[in-house]
């Protein structure tokens, strides 16, 4: 192989089921796992596939195939952070790694250094095993698309090498579904074109006229041509900072004072890279061992003084740090663009004094004990509450823009009870008021008691019912309820719910 030909070759490394691999680092389990995007399976573990779970399957169908299936949410940012370990490991032995997406990356095969393309892939696979990635596959070809298809057909910890000049022949027998374009694939199938050879045989000008720019690009891939040059990423700078104390220091104020210059360099190095740190992990060593480690979040971004404060608070709260401190490490875990946090013309962000006071309280009572309130989707006022530890970014598990049939009309109640209060609602003659299976009221509410020990009060006005039939397919968690808005003659307004003939007060309109 000539030098020019070797420079044009592509090696793709594929880590199968990467969303599952990344999710298991956050929540280890031996059960079958599926990562969900919306209500469909994005990726699943081998155990789940053995039970019949497939990518693109609906949630309900996947659970029917595998009752023990553990469903985890798709978290692209976590998957990308986990894949940074793989990228960094590859860059330690091979320069010029180009990430394609979490779980997939490409590079030029270093065949000269390792004695051949297959040998280079074997060295890479062995190195990834040392990083804890037990299933990686590689493919080598003249084009990126062909190398990816070869990697997807390689056995575990192995490599498929397509000889130079044979990428088009290797792709010819593959089905058109590998193009991953649902609209184009459906149309090609209806035209009787089932393989990449059939699609590639069409004239390029006709393809561009009929299918547009995207179709022309996929046509090039099907013919074994490169769509665009490989763009390798720049090796990220080392952003962590460490300070070793010789001799070790036993006083917190000495550690904090000595660390100030290191914290300033830590923040300045991030600023040079156009970044700010919103979450930092502080690790403390004593007698050569890690004795304290904690991740701190900031509602804006960490300045050097904020970092020193967190170190001081962590040492003051750490009961396990009994020996003198030998070293402190600052590891940035949350990085964002500096431009996204620039001050506006009239200032920006919460008051710094408030941030420091809340963070101080959080360091004393625990990270999960100081919460910020947000809004997410749901049918009940309690379900719409989103509680997030102070400083962390809120992540809504239910989108507020979804329809949520059966949810309350505005305005929302101001006071939501942690536990619904027992209530009573009766008619004018004292008869119980309920809701039939068709959602109609059995009688007009006349008197109500919003709390167990409250006095009876006449009903000034009421609205409802709003029936909700939740989780009807799950016998253990199914609920059939109806909600009412009730206003007393004293002007108090309440949100009540009736379930199985029992009334409850969920919230109050203040």
Image (cartoon, rainbow, N blue to C red):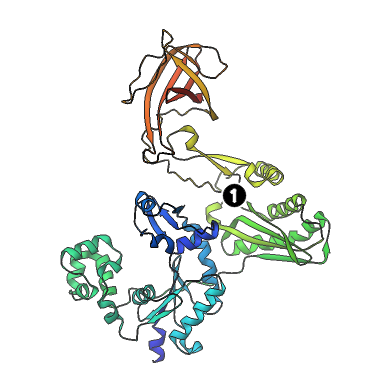
Q: Residue at x 41, y 30 (%)?
A: 408
Q: Residue furthest top?
A: 429
For residue 501, above or below residue 456: below
Q: Is residue 32 left or right of residue 344?
A: left
Q: Where residue 448 sits: x, y (%)?
A: 47, 15
Secondary structure of the residue carrying numbered label 1? loop
- In the rendered structure, the answer to whether residue 352 lies left or right of residue 166 reads right
Between 187 and 311, the residue placed more toward the observer is 187
Left or right: 64, with 503 as reference point: left
Indicate whether 473 appears above or below 41: above
Q: Identify the residue at horizontal 74%, vertical 65% (top origin).
A: 289
Counting labels gives 1
Which residue lies under the disc numbered 1? 300
Q: Nearer the viewer, residue 266 or 40?
A: 40
Whether 285 is drawn above or below 508: the answer is below
Query: Whole-percent x and y of residue 454?
Result: 56, 15
Q: Examine the rendering and report whether any part of residue 510 can be seen.
A: no
Q: Nearer the viewer, residue 131 or 355?
A: 131
């Amino acid at each position: 192989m000539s030098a020019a030909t070797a420079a044009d070759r592509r090696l793709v490394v594929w880590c199968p089921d990467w969303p599952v691999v990344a999710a298991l680092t956050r929540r280890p389990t031996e059960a079958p796992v599926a990562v969900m995007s919306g209500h469909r399976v994005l990726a699943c573990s081998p155990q789940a596939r053995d039970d019949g779970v497939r990518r693109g399957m609906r949630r309900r169908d996947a659970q029917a195939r595998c009752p023990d299936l553990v469903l985890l949410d798709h978290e692209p940012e976590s998957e990308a952070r986990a894949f940074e370990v793989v990228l960094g490991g590859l860059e330690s032995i091979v320069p010029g790694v180009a990430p394609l997406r979490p779980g997939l990356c490409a590079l030029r095969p270093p065949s000269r250094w390792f004695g051949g393309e297959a040998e280079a892939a074997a060295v890479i696979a062995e190195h990834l095993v040392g990083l804890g990635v037990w299933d990686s596959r590689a493919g080598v070809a003249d084009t990126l698309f062909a190398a990816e298809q070869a990697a997807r057909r390689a056995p575990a910890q192995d490599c498929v090498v397509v000889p130079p000049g044979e990428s088009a022949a290797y792709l010819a027998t593959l089905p058109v579904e590998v193009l991953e374009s649902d609209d184009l694939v459906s149309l090609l199938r209806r035209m009787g074109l089932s393989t990449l050879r059939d699609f590639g045989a069409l004239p390029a000008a006709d393809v561009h006229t009929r299918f547009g720019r995207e179709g022309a690009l996929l046509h090039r891939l099907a013919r074994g041509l490169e769509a665009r040059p490989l763009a390798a990423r720049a090796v990220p700078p080392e952003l962590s900072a460490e300070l070793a104390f010789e001799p070790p220091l036993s006083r917190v104020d000495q550690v904090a004072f000595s660390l100030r210059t290191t914290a300033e360099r830590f923040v300045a190095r991030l600023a040079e890279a156009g970044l700010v740190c919103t979450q930092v992990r502080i690790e403390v060593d004593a007698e050569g061992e890690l004795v304290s480690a904690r991740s701190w979040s900031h509602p804006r971004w960490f300045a050097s003084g904020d970092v020193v404060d967190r170190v001081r608070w962590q040492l003051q709260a750490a009961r396990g740090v009994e020996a003198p401190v030998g070293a402190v490490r600052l590891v940035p875990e949350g990085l964002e663009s500096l431009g996204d946090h620039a001050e506006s013309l009239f200032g920006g962000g919460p008051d710094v004094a408030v941030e420091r006071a809340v963070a101080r309280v959080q360091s004393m009572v625990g990270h999960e004990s100081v919460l910020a309130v947000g809004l997410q989707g749901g049918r009940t006022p309690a379900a719409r509450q989103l509680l997030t530890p102070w400083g962390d970014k809120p992540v809504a598990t239910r989108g507020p823009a979804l329809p949520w049939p059966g949810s309350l009309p505005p305005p929302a109640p101001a006071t939501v009870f942690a536990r619904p209060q027992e209530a009573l609602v009766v008619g004018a003659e004292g008869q119980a008021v309920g809701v039939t299976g068709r959602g109609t009221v059995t009688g007009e509410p006349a008197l109500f008691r919003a709390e167990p020990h409250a006095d009876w009060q006449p009903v000034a006005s009421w609205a409802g019912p709003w029936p909700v039939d939740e989780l009807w397919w799950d016998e253990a968690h199914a609920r059939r309820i109806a909600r009412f808005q009730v206003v007393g003659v004293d002007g108090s307004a309440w949100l009540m719910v009736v379930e199985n003939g029992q009334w409850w007060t969920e919230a109050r309109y203040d």
